[in-house]
Image (tube, grey):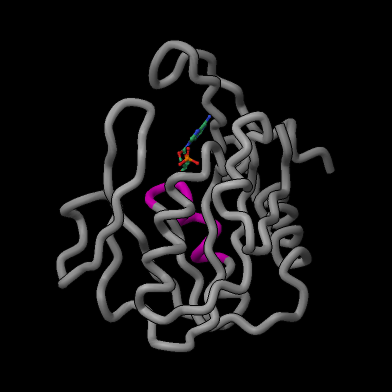
Amino acid sequence: MDLYTYIRNVKDFPKPGIDFKDITPLLNSPVATLACLDQLLKMLGDRKVDKVVGIESRGFFFATLLAHKLNAGFVPIRKPGKLPHKTIKRSYALEYGDDHIEMHIDAIENGDLVLLHDDVLATGGTAKAACELIEQLGGKIVQCNFLMELQFLRGREKIAGYDVQSVLKY
Ligand code: AMP
């Protein structure tokens, strides 16, 4: 099955110059979704995972599916001000200025084995900040996996040292 055909490229969204990778056609197909999930699980192998951390918001879809399959807990990382309980925060650079992400302070226990997941690895700034949050709480990152990797942005260099995997490469 050619999973690339389930990714819609939307030019100049949300702003000029961005080639947006839309995963809604993939999510709309149960067969393609399952094939993608199988590939993510295959990349992980038989490694044990206690928590799957998903990054808001498109990272949530497959992170929850992965957590279910791995019999692990799901942990959301969210944009500022969305999580109701006490949080820890990390800022990361955007094209202009910076932003931050948050995670609940009790979401990960010291020594937890953690799989980080997001839909797209672009510049890697978000994933790096997410890794820092996980490690701040004592989590051990088993793998960072993504549906897609925009290789020309060299995001994996920002998270060098981790096992970085992606299903589709652009
Ligand atoms: P970055 O921090 O640059 O690696 O950006 C990663 C985050 O931005 C992910 O949560 C993606 O969902 C989103 N993102 C970045 N570039 C794209 C793109 N071209 N299409 C869809 N989502 C993107």
Residue toward you, 53 or 34: 53
Is residue 104 found left or right of 22 in the rendered image? left
Residue 22 pos. (x, y %) = 54, 32
Q: Is residue 70 above or below residue 12?
A: below
Q: Is residue 66 above or below residue 113?
A: above
Residue 155 pos. (x, y %) = 58, 42
Residue 52 pos. (x, y %) = 50, 71
Query: Which residue: 75% across, 80% down?
Result: 46
Query: Which residue: 27% across, 31% down?
Result: 97
- Whether residue 57 is in magenta: the answer is yes
Q: Is residue 2 above or below residue 133?
A: above
The secondary structure that most of the magenta stretch takes on is helix
Quarter of the rendering occupied by the N terminus: top right
Residue stretch in magenta: 56-65
Q: Quadrant of residue 153?
A: top right
Residue toward you, 161 or 80: 161
Residue 93 pos. (x, y %) = 36, 39
Residue toward you, 58 or 165: 165
Is residue 114 found left or right of 34 in the rendered image? left
Quarter of the rendering occupied by the C terminus: top right
Query: Which residue: 39% across, 16% down?
Result: 15
- Whether residue 53 is in magenta: the answer is no
Residue toward you, 119 or 102: 102
